[in-house]
């Protein structure tokens, strides 16, 4: 523990809190662990600053929140298959995660959350946007909420990880493993907070179960535009040593790609989740 006081401050009205007073390199006390879990469930993302974590400490931190889900497609830190590399070198033009999405929604049991730790951050740019799917759901009309209640979304990794994509090669691979589609309710009840959240995302949702792609597209596009409204979002500026831990059931995120010619390196660990219904 860095101090006896854990300070939890919302960073904006819709999504995210910053937590100060914890040294994440040490095991969290039961009350500290409970505080982080509850803030994550309620606010969707928890941010920490000025942490110094080895790979083993990052893994030990993640394990306090659940089992680790090893990503099938990302390259990993040498000797640590649990740690996916989110990297862009100065000569590379595409980044990883450069569009609104939620991680692993294409899995039958989607990951609870992603713990992203910043090792090298460009002097300017490379921020990440987060959006609250609680806020997006709450702001829908009662009529649309009712329509969505009965629907299931079809999520896929095929179109993202099943195709070779230019200079992502070397960072993303194992294309032949992108075979799985999964369906989940379009409106989920969050397993910890009990709140309702919109659970479709532009990265991986390809339609509504039982609807054609053409039938699905207009409603999905409406929901995507609605959910990305600025008042549901927050823009996080990284520094080396920052850690963001987000809940994939209640948020989207979007890594901005505005730092051409600079290096950005983060380490990501995924925590296993539960079936969403
Ligand atoms: C991701 O999409 O998991 C990466 C987000 C980021 O690099 O900020």
Image (cartoon, rainbow, N blue to C red):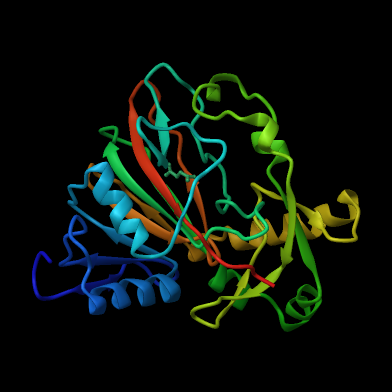
Q: Quadrant of residue 83?
A: top left
Image spot of residue 176 (x, y percent): 69, 31
Tell me, yes or no, if residue 44 can be seen here: yes
- Split into 4 quadrants, where in the image is the C terminus? bottom right
Of 117 and 277, which appears nearest the observer? 277
Residue plotted at (59% across, 51% down): 104
Q: Quadrant of residue 152?
A: bottom right
Q: Is residue 57 left or right of residue 181?
A: left
Image spot of residue 160 (x, y percent): 66, 37
Q: Is residue 30 left or right of residue 187?
A: left
Rendering quadrant holding ligand 1: top left
Q: Is residue 119 left or right of residue 247?
A: left
Residue plotted at (36% across, 59% down): 63
- Split into 4 quadrants, where in the image is the N terminus? bottom left
Of 35 and 203, which appears nearest the observer? 35
Residue plotted at (62% across, 24% down): 165
Tell me, yes or no, if residue 139 can be seen here: no
Q: Would you place residue 236 above or below residue 33 in this image?
A: above
Q: How many marks?
A: 0
Q: Would you place residue 184 above or below residue 127 in this image?
A: below
Of 7 and 228, which appears nearest the observer? 7
Residue plotted at (26% across, 72% down): 9
In the image as oriented, which residue stretches furthest toward the top? 91
Q: Would you place residue 58 above or below residue 122 in this image?
A: below
In the image as oriented, which residue stretches furthest toward the left? 3
Image spot of residue 223 (x, y percent): 70, 61
Image spot of residue 39 (x, y percent): 36, 74
């Amino acid at each position: 523990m860095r101090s006896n006081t854990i300070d939890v401050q919302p960073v904006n009205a819709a999504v995210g809190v910053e937590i100060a007073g914890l040294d994440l390199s040490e095991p969290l006390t039961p009350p500290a662990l409970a505080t982080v879990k509850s803030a994550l469930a309620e606010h969707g993302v928890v941010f920490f600053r000025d942490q110094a974590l080895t790979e083993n400490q990052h893994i030990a931190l993640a394990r306090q929140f659940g089992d680790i889900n090893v990503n099938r497609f990302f390259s990993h830190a040498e000797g640590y298959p649990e740690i996916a590399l989110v990297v862009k070198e100065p000569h590379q033009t595409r980044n990883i995660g450069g569009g609104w999405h939620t991680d692993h929604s294409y899995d039958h049991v989607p990951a609870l959350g992603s713990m992203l730790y910043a090792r090298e951050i460009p002097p300017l740019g490379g921020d990440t946007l987060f959006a609250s799917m609680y806020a997006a759901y709450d702001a829908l009309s009662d009529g649309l909420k009712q329509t969505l209640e009965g629907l299931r979304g079809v999520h896929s990794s095929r179109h993202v990880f099943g195709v070779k994509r230019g200079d992502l090669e070397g960072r993303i691979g194992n294309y032949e493993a992108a075979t799985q589609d999964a369906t989940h309710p379009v409106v989920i009840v969050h397993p910890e907070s009990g709140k309702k959240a919109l659970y479709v995302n532009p990265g991986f949702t390809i339609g509504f179960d039982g609807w054609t792609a053409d039938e699905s597209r207009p409603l999905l596009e409406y929901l995507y535009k609605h959910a990305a409204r600025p008042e549901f979002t927050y823009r996080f500026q990284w520094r080396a040593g920052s850690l963001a831990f987000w809940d994939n059931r209640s948020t989207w995120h979007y890594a901005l790609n505005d730092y051409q010619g600079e290096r950005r390196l983060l380490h990501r660990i995924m925590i296993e989740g539960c079936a969403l219904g």
